[in-house]
Image (cartoon, helix red, strand yellow):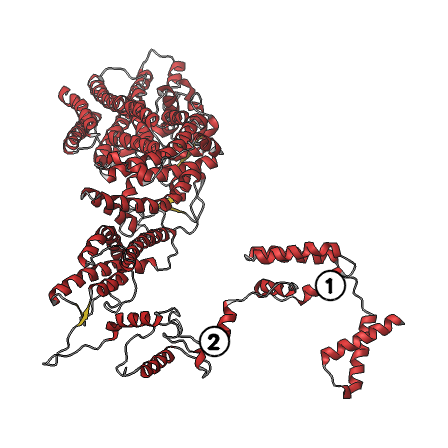
Amino acid sequence: MAYLAELGALTGELIAAVTAIPEDQRARLDAYRESAVRSLRHHKFGQTNQFDVDDRLRGYEEHFRVVNREALADALSKRLGALKPHHNQWTPEVLHFILELSDQPAQKSRLSDLDLLVEPDVDVVPQLTWQEIAKEDGWDEEQALWKNVNFSPSSDEDDDDNEDALSVASAESLTSASSGDDRHHRIARRLAIRSPGGEVLLEVAENSQAWRHATPATDGDGRSKKISLTTSQLLREILFMLGGLETSLFDRKSNPLATYQLVGVSWDTHKALVTSFAECGRKLAPLRGFSKQNEQVPLLQVFQDSLQKSLRSFDQKLAKIQGRLVEIKEDLVVSLIGVLTELGPHLAPLYVLSGIVRQLQEERNPRAFRYLELLFDAVGIAQMEGNLAIYEFLGSIFFDCFQVYLKPIRIWMEEGRLLPGDRTFFVSESPTKPPLPQIWRSQFNLLRTPEGNLHAPRFLRPAINRIFTAGKSIIVLKHLKHHDAARSRRDEAEPQMNFGDVCPAILEFAPFSELFSASFHAWIQSKHHTASSTLRELLFSGNGLFQSLDALQHIYLMSDGSQADAFASAVFKHLDSLSDSWRDRFTLTEIAQEAFSPSVDRYRLSAKINTRVLGHSAVASRSSVRLSLPAIRLDFRLNWPVQIIVPEESIEGYQAIFAFLLQSRRAVFVLKNSILGSQVSEAGLVDHLARYYLLRSKLLWFCNSIMTYLTSLVLAPNTDRLRRCLNEATDVDDMITAHSDFINRIINESCQGPKLQPIRDCMLDIFDLAIKLDDAHQVEMVKRAEEEEEISRLSIMSSPSKTPAKRKKAVQPKKEDDDEDDLDPNWESMIAKKGGTTDKPHAIKLKDLDSDFERHLRFVASGLRGVGRASREEAAGKWDLLAEMLEIGIRGD
C-alpha cells in the first residue's frame, strides 16, 4: 500500500506539472491522475535493456567522431568512464531516459555547457578582465574609440578656454557615449602624458600634423597655393605608402596629391621625386593585394606565403629606416634620394614578383602552375643579366614553390597514386576500370589543354613521359604483386631539389635551365630507374616476353619453314578438294595446333574464320588467293603483361604478314603439285609443255624471289633488331615503341602499307596467275586423256584381231578405283567452266597468261623503283633492292 500511495502521489505531481490544469477543475485532474496510475500499475513493459543503452551510447560516440566532433566524443567517453564506479540498478534507466530526451546532440551540443557543472573554487581570487574594465569605464559603449582622431587646429583658438572646449567637442564627435557623463569622454589632452611637459609634447605633435588639415592659401590671382611639406614629413608619408598604409599625400592607388609641395624645391622637382616613389608603391600594390587573397590551391598558397615573407622582409627594412629617423643617435641628413637609393636593391626583386602577379591577373583563367613558368623564366633572365642577388632571391622562391608541385609527382612515381581533387597534376585516371592488358594505355592519361599542350609547366615537359611511365610501372607491379620488390630496390636518399644544391656558386655561369634539367633528371632517374628496371626484368624472366615473341614469329612470320608448310599444305588440300571443312574453326585449330606444337603450347593456339570476308563458292575460294586466305586468322593467347608490349594493333600487323606469306605459299604449292595425266602421250604436247614449263618456272622464280626477300631481307634482320632494341630499352614505353616500330617496318618493307597498295595487288594478281596456269594445264590434260581414251576404245572396237571378250572388256567403262590418280569428273567440269577456259585454245591461253605475267612484273618492278626513289622512308632502300631483284627476270626474258 505504501508503494501505491507513493506512486499515486508522484503521478499526481507529474500530471499537474504536465497538464497545468487549475485547481478549480479538480475532477478533470483526478480523472487524468487515475488513468495514468492505472496505466503505470498495469503496464506490460519490462526493465530497460542495459545492453541496448550501452550500444546506443557507443553509437553516439562513433557518430560524433565521424562528423568531426572529436572533442564531444572524448567528453562523452570520459563521462561514461567516470560513471562506471557509481553504477547501480537505476543507471540504465537514467541513461535511457536521457537518451530519449536527446535531440540531435551532434549539432546542438556545446562543450561550454559542461563548465556550468564545475563547482567554482571559493578561495580563488577573481581575475580582472579587459571586458570588465571596458564595462566599468564605458569602453564597450564607445564604438569609435579607436578611430583616427582629427588633429586639425581650430580657427577660433583665442584663449585656452576655447581650445579646451574645441578639443572636447572634437573628442565628442569621434566617440559615442552611452550617457551624458563627461567622465566617459576620451580627449587628447586628458590622454596626454601626465609627466611634466606632457602638454607641450602634445602641442608639438598637433603642430607637426597640422599640415594634413591645412587649407591651401590663395595668391593675388585667386589660385590656390601648395601646402608646404618638410623633407621629414614627406619621407614619413612615403614610407607609410610603401608599407601599404593609408596616407594623406597619396591616394589608394599610390598617386600623389597635387595639393602639397616639398619646401625649398620647384614643383617639377617635387613632382618628379614624388612620382618616383609613387611608381614604387604602384608596383608593390599587386603584391600586397595578392598576398591578402584567400587561396584554396596549395600551389598558390605556397606562392602567397613566399610573397608575404618577401613583403615582411621589406617592411622590416622600412621599419629600420623609420627607427633610424625617429631615434637619432648621431648627425643624420634626411635625403629622399638617399632613401630611394637605399631601397633600390630591396625593391628590384619585388618588382619582378609584382610583374609575375600582374601577368597572372591579366591572363584569362591562368593555370595554377602558371606562376612557376613565369618564375622559371625570371630566374633565367636574372642570371643572364648578371644580377646575382635577384637570381638567388627568385631561385630560392622558385624551389620553395616547386617543392609543393613535387609532392604529387613523388607520390605518383613511388606509389602510383593520384591525390584526390588535385587539378594541378598532369595525370588523370579513367572513371572506368579497363581490362588488365589495357591498363598501360587506357587507365591513366596525360591531361592536355584545349590547344593540345600538356597540362604541365613548360620546363617539365621533356620529362613528363618518364614521370608518366614510372607511375604506370608501379601500377603494373602492384597488379603483379611485385611492388614491394621495387620499393626495396629504391634508393633511400633522393637528390635534393633546392637552390643551393641545384645552383652551386661554382656553376654560376652555367645556364639555369640546364642546371635544373640535369638535377631534375637525376631526381627522376632515382625513382624511374627502379620501377622500370624491375618491371622490365619481370617481363623478361617471369612472363616470358622473348618466348612469346618467338611463338608469334613461328606462327605469323613462319620462321620455321617445316611447321609453316605443314599448316599451309593441310589448308591448301582442303581448298583443292573443294570441301568446306577448311572454314570450320575447329578443324583449322586442330591443323594449327598439330603443325606448330613443337614450338608453342597447343592450348594457347586457336584459329577462326572471318565470316565477313567469306561469301563465295568453294570453286571461287580455291581459284584466288584474295578470297579465302585472308579470312584465316590464328590467335595466340599471350599473358596480359606481354599484351602491354604486344597490343591488339600489333597482332593485326602480324596477321597481315601472315596472310601475305600464306598467299605466296599457296602459289608455290599449286605450281609444285601440278599433275600430268599418266595416260597422255607426249606426242603433240611438246610445244604445249615447253610453254607451260617456261611460264611455270617464271612464276616459281617470282614467288621464290618474294619469299627470299621477305625472309632474308625483311623478317630476319628486323627480328634481330627487335631483340637488340628490347634488351637496350630502359622502360616499358621504350619496349612498346621498339615493338611498334618493328611492326611498322616489316609492314612497309613487305609492301603491305597503304602507299604500296597497288603494287601489293599486282603481286596477288601474279599469285593468281599460278592458280590459273595450273587450272588451264589440268583441263588440257584431262581433255587430252579423254581424247586418247576415246581413240583407244574406237581402235579396239574396230580391230578384227580382238576376241569378243576383249572387245566387251574394252567397251566397259573404267571403274573409279582403277586409277587413283584420275580426277573427279564433277571437279573437272567445274574447272573447265571456270572463267570460260573452254572458249580459247590452250596455246592462246598460255600466251595470254605469259603476257599478263610480263605486264604485272614490269609494273611491280617499275613501281617499286619509283616509290623507292621518291620516298625518304627507311624502307625505300629495301623497295629499291626488291625492284632490282625482279628486274633480273625482265632482263633475262
- Amino acid tagged 2: Gly
- Return the mark for residue 776: none
CB within 8 Å, label 1 to label 2: no
Tell me which residue sits at (15%, 65%) in the image: 271
Question: 10 Å neighbourhood of mark 1: few (<14), some, or many (≥20)?
Answer: few
Mark 1 or mark 2: which comes first in sequence? 1
Residue 223 appears in view = yes
In the picture shown, does residue 688 fall above or below 801? below
Is there any visible trace of residue 656 in the rendered image?
no
Quarter where residue 652 is shown: top left
The answer to whether 318 appears left or right of 34 in the picture is left
Q: Is residue 548 above or below residue 131?
A: above
> Where residue 166 sits: x, y (%)?
33, 81
Q: Name the residue beneath numbered marker 1.
A: 94
Tally of numbered tags: 2
Q: Nearer the viewer, residue 868 or 632?
A: 868
- Occupied quadrant, residue 798: top left
- Kindly identify the amino acid type of the residue bearing the numbered disc 1: Val
**Quarter occupied by the N terminus:** bottom right
Q: Secondary structure at mark 1?
A: helix
Q: Which image quarter: residue 792?
A: top left
Q: Which residue is mark 2?
A: 138
Q: Quadrant of the C terminus?
A: top left
**Residue 669 drawn at (x, y percent):** 32, 23
Dot 2: element: loop
State the CA–CA distance, disc 1 to disc 2. Answer: 48 Å
x, y percent for residue 546: 39, 25
460 displayed left or right of 34 = left
Residue 616, percent from left and from top: 35, 38
